[in-house]
Image (tube, grey):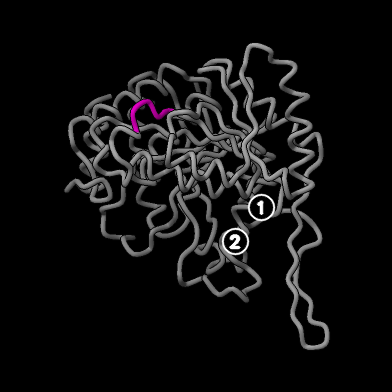
Amino acid sequence: MQANIVLLPGDGIGPEVVAAAVRVLKAIETKFGHTFTFTEELIGGCSIDKHGVALTDSALKACQAADAVLLGAVGGPKWDDPTAKERPEKGLLALRKGLGVFANLRPVKAYPNLTDASPLRPEKLTGVDMVVVRELTGGVYFGEPKGRDTVNGVTRAVDTMAYTDEEIRRIVDMAFKLAGGRKKKVTSVDKANVLESSRLWRQVTAEVAKNYPDIKMENMLVDTAAMRLVSNPAEFDVVVTENMFGDILTDEAAVLSGSMGLLPSASLGSGGPGLYEPIHGSAPDIAGKGIANPIGTILSSAFMLRYSLKLEKEAAAVEAAVEKTIASGTLTADLGGKANTKEVTESILSNL
């Protein structure tokens, strides 16, 4: 296997955790006889500082031409002016749109020896193993019209939540396909009692469900889903939802594992390179201290091996090495441990 991988380390702890994942990928490269070529580009605040924009056209073109893209994190207090025309997150949204990645897969798993790291009681975490499939290129983050106007001294801001039936159908279909290889259960999350876009979502989901008679499907309002995630999380298998709901619910679900630093994600489309990133932010308060948890990014690289490069054995090897490291108690401070980024990475490397 020869693969071209674009690295987007980004801001804060992004460069540290991406560097850790690259060490693991290079070990996989050597162990299994592959050739990975890494190219680095800027995104987020660091790109604003150098180029004036959060993602340049040349960086986007490099990503589009790659076999896969590995991202760290974007943002930080330095670029947190709400009146700024260019914000780090704008680069992330442009990247997702430019790559055509419409489905974001976020697995949430409870590890037996990390139950004390979660605020939930240990018995609530037994059997927790779910995947949230979040629609990524539609909804209120991309809907038009969007903006502000001032009339008679009153300032009004508008964001539009919009979906087409095709946008809904493709993400829901992916969720059902994923459920077929798991526990055969899909929970579709919406706000159909209030939002017209959610009523369309529910209608299209029902149509797609007819194509998968062996899979159990349920609809759930987003406020109910938020409650059930902490009261009975083990009931979920595959959860599919729209962009903003998925953004919020997956951050809530992160506490089930014990730390956002553990959770990877894969953003996939109908073709072209996938985008892989941990779900955590840039954590500027610990950037440069060498104590960031690299596991979410390393597991994201395992997703990259599986989904973009079709290297299932290699992906499974990375995941097994991570599980052995967690079981050994080699953990960063966010999980109650004393290990630093380098020590966790080296433990994973030793377990490959």
- Judging depth in this view, the residue of 241 and 54 nearest the camera is 241
Q: Are marks 1 and 2 in contact (CB under 8 Å)?
A: yes
Find residue 55 and name its label: none
Query: Mark 2 or mark 1, which is nearer the start of the sequence?
Result: 2
Displayed quadrant of residue 330: top left
Q: CA distance from mark 1 to mark 2?
A: 9 Å
Residue type indicated by callout 2: Ala
User: Helix, strand or loop at disc 2?
Assistant: loop
* Residue 54 tag number: 2
Amino acid type, residue under disc 1 in the picture: Ala
Q: In front here: 213 or 9?
A: 213
| Residue toward you, 142 or 72 | 142
| Mark 1 closeness class: few <14, some 14–19, many ≥20 residues within 10 Å | some
Residue 321 visible from this viewpoint: yes
Above or below, 336 relative to 264: below
The magenta span reads 125-129
The answer to whether residue 273 is seen in the rendering is no
Count how many numbered circles sit on residues in the image.
Answer: 2
Residue 318, how many percent across, how many down? 35, 26
Q: Residue at x 45, y 59 (%)?
A: 11
Residue 191 relative to residue 4: left or right: right
Q: Position of residue 279 (x, y in %)?
A: 47, 46
Residue assigned mark 1: 94
x, y percent for residue 148 = 75, 73
Classify 10 Å Cα crowding around label 2: few (below 14), some (14-19), many (20 and above): many
Q: Is residue 251 left or right of residue 163?
A: left
Frontmost residue, 154 versus 347: 154
> Which quadrant of the rendered structure holds the C terminus?
top left
- Which residue is pictured at 74% across the width and 53% down the height? 161
Secondary structure that dominates the magenta span: loop
- Residue sticking out furthest to the bottom: 153
Q: Quadrant of residue 164?
A: top right
